[in-house]
Image (cartoon, rainbow, N blue to C red):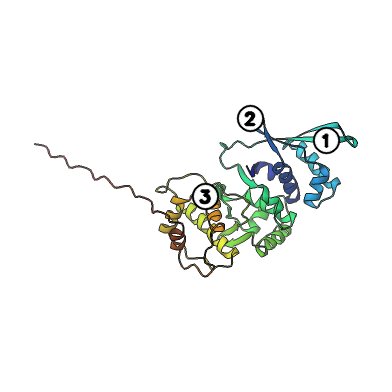
Amino acid sequence: MNYRVISKDSLLKLTHKEAFVFSCIVLNTDLENDGKMYISHIKEETLAEMSGYSKKTVISYIKKFEQLGLLHVKREKMKGKLGVFDRNTYSIKIPDSNLGENWFRLSYDFLKEEIPCDLKGFLLLLKCLGLKGSNTVLYSLDKIGKLNLLRIGLNKIKELNRLGISLKVISKVEKGYVITDRFIYEDLPAQKADSVSERILVDYYNGIAAYCKRMEIKPPKYDKDIMNTIFYNCPNLEQFIDKMNNRNFSKTQIYSLEYFVKSFNFKKPVKKKRVEPCEIIMF
């Protein structure tokens, strides 16, 4: 399993820098207690190296995580080949997947991505504001600042957002922003193709459009019927992006969403036949 599940409630108690260090711990864990707990022995020096923050800063963050109840730390003296050393064991409760949209999946490859760690932390916090498990945020930056939705000042929010757009891990859409970083997974609620709301289809389309822009392709126009077909065959945007990444597709302009349907041999959803009421004739 190349991903870990992170609690949105936990991240929203942190700044963007703290959120990234916390994610470093979570992504460097093993499963224990019948899959209910993450356990990590990552060193403070390693966290400092991964984040670019000082060891002193990392230690202060860990103390804060502990005080907030985000993790439990067991400190021990261990004997090794080079003598006695300190070892921390971090225990983190895995979010309950039954608790609605209070969690999301994050790939380990997120740590390897060549973008600034401050921006990575910001992306994690922005994800927590996504609509119903999606990577679409329907807030303006001013609204995020005014409502204090993140523990970051408005000027810093705007600075990191501009950086994210320039590095093509955030895309501006008509009513907000879409996180286009491929290592932050979408976990949209399962819905039947014949009952999915257009809001879900629009969010899905925004993700496709953002992907096209990142690949320097002009996105095709939105079409509800075609989006319904795409959703019917591939209800998770992350799976759709994986299909695109694993296929040598034309990088010229894509004139219609139908291109994706034909490329992946998607089948159109079967519409339920309406049963006409029988006319009963009484004799």
Expressed as whole percent of the image width and height from the top left, the position of residue 200 reads 49, 52
Front-lying residue, 57 or 265: 265
Callout 2 secondary element: loop
* Residue 149, visible in the rendered structure: no
- Dot placed on the residue nearer the N-terminal end, 3 or 1: 1
- Dot placed on the residue nearer the N-terminal end, 2 or 1: 2
Q: Quadrant of the C terminus?
A: top left
- Find disc 3 in the rendering and name its residue: 236
- Find disc 2 in the rendering and name its residue: 34
Answer yes or no: do the residues labelled 2 and 1 have beta carbons within 8 Å? no
Q: Residue at x 82, y 32 (%)?
A: 75
Identity of the residue furthest to the front in this view: 81
Callout 3 secondary element: loop
Say which amino acid is labelled 2. Answer: Asp
Front-lying residue, 75 or 222: 75
* Residue 24, visible in the rendered structure: yes
- Find disc 1 in the rendering and name its residue: 87
- Dot placed on the residue nearer the N-terminal end, 2 or 3: 2
Identity of the residue furthest to the right in this view: 83
| Crowd tier of the residue under label 3, counting other residues whose Cα lies within 10 Å: few below 14, some 14–19, many 20 or above | some
Residue 162 in the figure: left or right of residue 210 = right
Question: Is residue 133 placed above or below 214 in the rendered structure?
Answer: above
| Crowd tier of the residue under label 1, counting other residues whose Cα lies within 10 Å: few below 14, some 14–19, many 20 or above | some
| Crowd tier of the residue under label 2, counting other residues whose Cα lies within 10 Å: few below 14, some 14–19, many 20 or above | few
Number of numbered callouts drawn: 3
